[in-house]
Image (tube, rainbow, N blue to C red):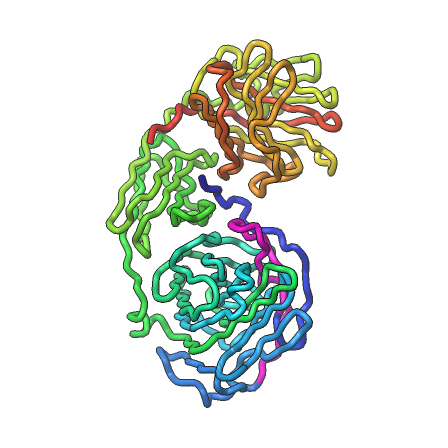
């Protein structure tokens, strides 16, 4: 299963200052291996060193550098965290400290650029947990785009901004990325809003973004292990104008991907990613773009091959999921009617839910817009079930907001299915501190079916969360904000009502549910 990247930006762990001429910065989370990855954001600019043209030649109107001239313009610096500089006809970067990226700029400005370079990582066999990258459109403060590989065979594309690191292509394992200590050829293309990445001339990743249109180029490396440095040796660097014949050196084959929306509702997210990708990655639709019901949208699909596809509505509910879709030829996917069963908006006239007092709290329709649950007694559950709607298999989607935002508010809340007359049932639960799990309720006690763990997908505090609980046969699946959280199996409850639940822990609290939508399970 995959997770959708919703939050957009990963929290910067900390700010580390820069040395005299080399740039150093802090790290963010690697979703694939649990290690920490560096970000270029938040750095002061450096002073450009003198530039010589002795080692430069015209190549597609830009330049090449064999690094034989130590005054060709790249940053030279040594700090307690590492170093960048020229050594024996190479540009060498050594990152000494965990979670710190060391990088050097070329001090040249480009809009569109095609980058080629070779890199060898002599430390790759003893420390595979690293990041080696070529960067384009680097700003004075270090923001820009980074095309990264690691010595354990992964690749990714990231964007660095003032707010942190945004994943454009998540860290993904690939047999096309050599492991250990080998010479690897990296190619990156920044053209308009399009970003392309090749490893040893094999296409691995494509993304699109329009935030940065021009900037410097740089090279970088980092280590993800304490006391395990990373040493990257770059040679044979070139930066070409992709709007010339230089573009003929790369494979830009593409097919067409068409989405026909017959679902009866708007489509807000379309994903097509490498089957090995741990998340759904970047949305093919722009932030303000939708595919309205009855409309068709066509996307260019670069680097044809197998892709997993996920198409979601504007509530992050999957309308279509396909595995190993073959994009070696044009692909057309028709999204069928989602078969919505119920759509409760919780207005003041909604009588499908009986509100009022219970032994541990109460519920009410509030502001003509929410169904609110109030936990009036700590450590006791408040449940409310639909009045006359029972079902066996169903997909439930709701938006829920914790009203009381305190550091110690650990109250679990969420959706229930298969609710029995005595309140037993399946509980899809999250908490204000970012935990999530699937539970079952029995005799007023709940028990975990999946581990109660923190997830980056859960918006903490008083930010709203889209909760989806799938109850299909004996299989129960939880998604938060479009991200897959977990799946489990349980046999005791064959059917029942749908409901909402809250437990005040360690104190009383309130949760507002904005809506609850029910769908028939999709048959793929």
Magenta range? 24-49
* Quarter assignment of residue 500: top right
Residue 480, visible in the rendered structure:
yes
Image quarter hosting the C terminus: top left
Relative vertical location of residue 268 with respect to residue 305 in this rendering, above or below: above
Residue at the image position 42 percent from the left and 68 percent from the top: 184
Q: Relative to 489, is 40 on the left or the right?
A: right
Farthest bottom residue in view: 54
Q: Position of residue 253 (x, y in %)?
A: 28, 59
Q: Relative to 85, is 270 on the left or the right?
A: left
The answer to which of 19 and 337 lies nearer the viewer is 19
Relative vertical location of residue 440 with respect to residue 237 in this rendering, above or below: above
Farthest left residue in view: 329
Say whether residue 269 is magenta: no
Q: Relative to 344, is 341 on the left or the right?
A: left
Q: Position of residue 100 (x, y in %)?
A: 62, 63
């Amino acid at each position: 299963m995959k997770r959708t990247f919703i939050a957009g930006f990963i929290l910067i762990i900390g700010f580390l200052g820069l040395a005299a001429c080399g740039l150093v910065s802090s790290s963010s989370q690697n979703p694939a291996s649990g290690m920490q990855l560096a970000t270029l954001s938040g750095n002061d600019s450096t002073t450009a060193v003198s530039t010589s043209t002795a080692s430069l030649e015209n190549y597609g109107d830009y330049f090449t550098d064999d690094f034989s001239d130590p005054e060709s313009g790249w940053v030279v610096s040594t700090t307690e965290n590492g170093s960048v500089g020229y050594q024996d006809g190479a540009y060498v970067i050594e990152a000494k400290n965990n979670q710190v990226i060391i990088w050097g700029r070329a001090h040249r400005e480009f809009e569109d650029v095609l980058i080629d370079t070779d890199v060898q990582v002599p430390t790759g066999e003893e420390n595979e947990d690293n990041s080696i990258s070529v960067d384009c459109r680097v700003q004075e403060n270090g923001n820009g785009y980074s095309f990264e590989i690691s010595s354990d065979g992964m690749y990714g594309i990231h964007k660095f901004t003032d707010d942190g690191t945004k994943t454009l292509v998540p860290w993904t394992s690939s047999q096309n990325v050599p492991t250990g200590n080998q010479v690897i050829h990296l190619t990156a293309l920044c053209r308009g809003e399009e970003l392309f990445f090749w490893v040893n001339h094999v296409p691995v990743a494509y993304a699109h973004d329009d935030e940065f249109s021009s900037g410097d180029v740089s090279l970088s490396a980092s280590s993800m292990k304490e006391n395990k440095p990373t040493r990257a040796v770059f040679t044979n660097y070139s930066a070409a104008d992709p709007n010339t014949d230089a573009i003929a050196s790369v494979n830009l084959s593409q097919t067409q991907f068409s989405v026909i929306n017959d679902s009866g509702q708007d489509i807000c997210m379309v994903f097509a990613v490498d089957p090995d990708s741990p998340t759904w990655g970047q949305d093919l639709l722009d932030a303000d773009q939708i595919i309205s019901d009855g409309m068709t949208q066509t996307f260019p699909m670069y680097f044809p091959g197998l892709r997993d596809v996920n198409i979601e509505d504007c509530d992050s509910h999957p309308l279509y999921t396909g595995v190993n879709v073959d994009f070696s030829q044009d692909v057309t996917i028709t999204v069928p009617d989602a078969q919505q069963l119920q759509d409760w908006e919780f207005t003041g006239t909604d009588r499908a839910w009986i509100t009022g007092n219970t032994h541990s709290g109460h519920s009410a329709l509030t502001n003509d817009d929410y169904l609110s649950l109030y936990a009036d007694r700590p450590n006791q559950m408040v449940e409310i079930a639909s009045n006359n709607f029972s079902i066996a298999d169903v997909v439930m989607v709701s938006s829920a907001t914790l009203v009381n935002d305190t550091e110690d508010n650990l109250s679990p809340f969420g959706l229930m299915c298969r609710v029995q007359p005595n309140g037993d049932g399946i509980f899809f639960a999250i908490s204000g501190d970012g935990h999530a799990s699937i539970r079952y309720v029995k005799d007023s006690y709940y028990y975990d079916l999946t581990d109660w763990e923190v997830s980056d997908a859960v918006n903490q505090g008083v930010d709203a969360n889209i909760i989806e609980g799938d109850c299909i046969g004996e299989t129960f699946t939880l998604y938060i904000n479009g991200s897959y959280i977990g799946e489990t199996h349980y046999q005791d409850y064959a059917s029942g009502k749908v409901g909402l639940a809250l437990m005040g822990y360690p104190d009383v609290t309130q949760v507002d549910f904005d809506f609850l939508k029910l769908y028939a399970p999709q048959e793929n």
